[in-house]
Structure formats: structure tokens, C-alpha cells
Image (spheres, grey):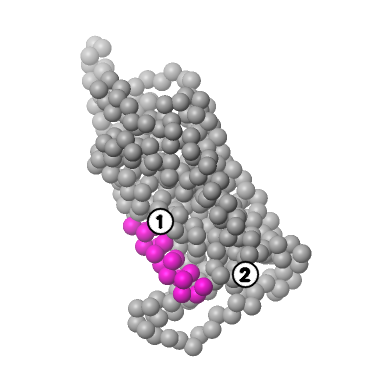
Amino acid sequence: MSSNNNTSITLAILQLQSAFRYPSLILGFILLIGGVLGNTLNIIFFIKLGNYKINACSLYMFVRTFLDFYVLLTGLTTRILATGFQIDFTLMNRIWCKIRLGFTDITDESSYTLICLQSIDAFMCSSPSVAVRQKSNIQIAPYLILGTLCFWFVHEILYFIFQDLVIVGDTPMCITTNTIFVQYRSYFVYLGIFTTIPIIVISIFGYFTVRHMKTIGVTRALSSLTKQTISMALFQILAVLVFNGPYTAWSIYLIVTANVVKDTYRRALEQLIASFASTYSYGPYASSFYCYCLSKRFRNQLIVSLKELICGIHTNQVFPNT
């Protein structure tokens, strides 16, 4: 009887794995291909127009494009290979095991920090107060970006030390060898830095930015470039909420039920859901271009830039910055 139950459970788990594998793989390829294409067009847009040289919010977006590129190429690509094709290089090379997730996390954390800075800058640019609007300063933005990258690099040094490729029962595993550091990353890094904190920050500043934009006097006082970057920032905030909200809820569930006794089927189901949620959480890195396309001015400028780049067509259309 026990043997029959084990067989049925095994079959049910295999059916679950088959059901989750292909949707997760398809989603991963959609995010990867769409994200690489979108970020490439973002780079063309920002370089051709040069808005990042005079606008702090545009500079944050421009730098984030390169960070998102790195996350997609090193994080999502290797995840697709590992979950979809069982090719996990972290189990084959000790150096890659120690640095792969560490550098990806540095880029993740920097990208989310820049999203927060972007939302704060949009809030300041849309403020009814002239003094607050003047605090959006392109001269300070490069130092904030450099400080962000340095801070998160220092933050991840312990990960490079504790992460290692070990053999557990003849099975190679790329794991963190320090239990205290594992708890720190589970409770603070993944639940706080990657999910809860960015959602709270961008929600608060996004809410007040929308309130500011509803003020007719403020809207008239803003330049067309500022209006465009604010709308682009708001659309990006929406994307972060859509993609990070479910992942945050799932992370909270895993932490709350960490000490609950679970059977084999439930553990397998949770593992598959966690894998799908992890792939889904790459959405913010792949969606920025498509969020920006919701801005009509961005679409028009992008078409003009592509015509100039591909066809050599130079139009007389002018997009004023002030």
C-alpha cells in the first residue's frame, strides 16, 4: 500500500514538473528576447538624444539600461539553461559558483536603487515648490550612481567569501556555507532590498508625483523633457509593482511557512512555484523600453532616431528641452 502511495506521489510530482517546465521556459525566453531588444533600443534612444547629459532622471534610466542588460544576459540566461536544459555552470566551475550570483545581486541592487532614485527625482521635478524642483541636479546624479555601485559591491563581499561549490552526498551543490549569512540574505536581502523596500519607496513617491502632476500650475511650469521623463518613470514604477508584487507575496509565504512540516508533494509544488516566480521577477529588467513606449513623445523621438541611424534620414523635427 505504501509503495502504491509513493508511486502515485512520484507520478504527480513528475506531472507537476512537466506542467511548470514549459511555461517557465517560454516566459524566460520572452523576457530574455524582449528585454535584450528593448534595452538595445533604449541605448540607441538615449545616446542619439543625449537627454541623460542634462536630466538626472534620464541619466538614472540610461545607466539602468546597462545594468538590466547585464542581469538578463548573466542572470536570466543561466537560469534558463539551468531550469530548462539542466545545464548549470555553477555546479561545474567553483569560480563561477562564487561570483555569478554575487555580481548579479550587485547589479540587481544597483538597478532597484536607481529606480528609487528615479522615482524620488520625478517627485522633486513635479513638486509645486521651485526650491524642491531645483534639488533635481544633474551634477549630483553621477556621484549618487557611483556611490550606489560601490556600496553594493562592498555589501556583497561576504557573499564571495561564503559562497562555495561543495559535495553533499556525491552531489555537487553551489551553496552559502555560513548559516547566519543565509538567514540575513533570506530575511533582509531578498525580502527587503529586492522586494519590499523598493515597492514601498516607489509607491510613496509615485503617489505624490501623480498628485503633483494633477496640479495644472505645476504641469504648465514643467519643460516637455521633464514631463516626458516623469511619465516614463511612473510607467516604470507600475512595471516594478506588477512584476515584484507576486514575488514579494511568495517570498513572505516561504518565510512564514519555513518551519511548517510539509510532505513531498507540497515541497515539490513550492519549489516549482518558486522557480516560476523567480523567472517572472526578471520582468522589471526586460520591460523598461515597453513602459517608456507608453509615452507618445518617446515613441516619436525613437522613430526619428531609428530613421537617422538606419536610413540616414535627418528630419527637421525639433523636440525642445526647455
Residue 196 image-quadrant placement: top right
Relative horizontal placement of residue 291, taking residue 84 as reference (left or right): right
- The residue under label 1 is 69
Q: Nearer the viewer, residue 261 or 75?
A: 75
Residue 109 visible in the current orientation: yes
Packing grade of label 1 (10 A; few <14, some 14-19, many >=20) is many
Q: Position of residue 72 (x, y in %)?
A: 38, 52
Q: Which structural element holds mark 1?
A: helix
Residue 159 circle label:
none
Q: CA distance from mark 1 to mark 2?
A: 25 Å
Label 2 sits on residue = 226
Q: Residue at x 53, y 45 (%)?
A: 152
At a point 46% along the width and 49% down the height, the residue shown is 107
Magenta region, main secondary structure: helix
Q: Amino acid at mark 2?
A: Thr
Q: Position of residue 181 (x, y in %)?
A: 50, 29
Q: Residue at x 72, y 69 (%)?
A: 218
Indicate the position of residue 291 as horizontal and vertical percent values. 49, 61
Q: Magenta part of the protein: which range?
A: 33-50
Q: Quadrant of residue 104?
A: top left
x and y, in percent, of residue 76 in the image: 36, 48
Badge 1 amino acid: Phe
For marks 1 and 2, give the one nearer the viewer.
1
| Number of numbered discs overlaid on the protein picture | 2
Q: Residue furthest bottom?
A: 316
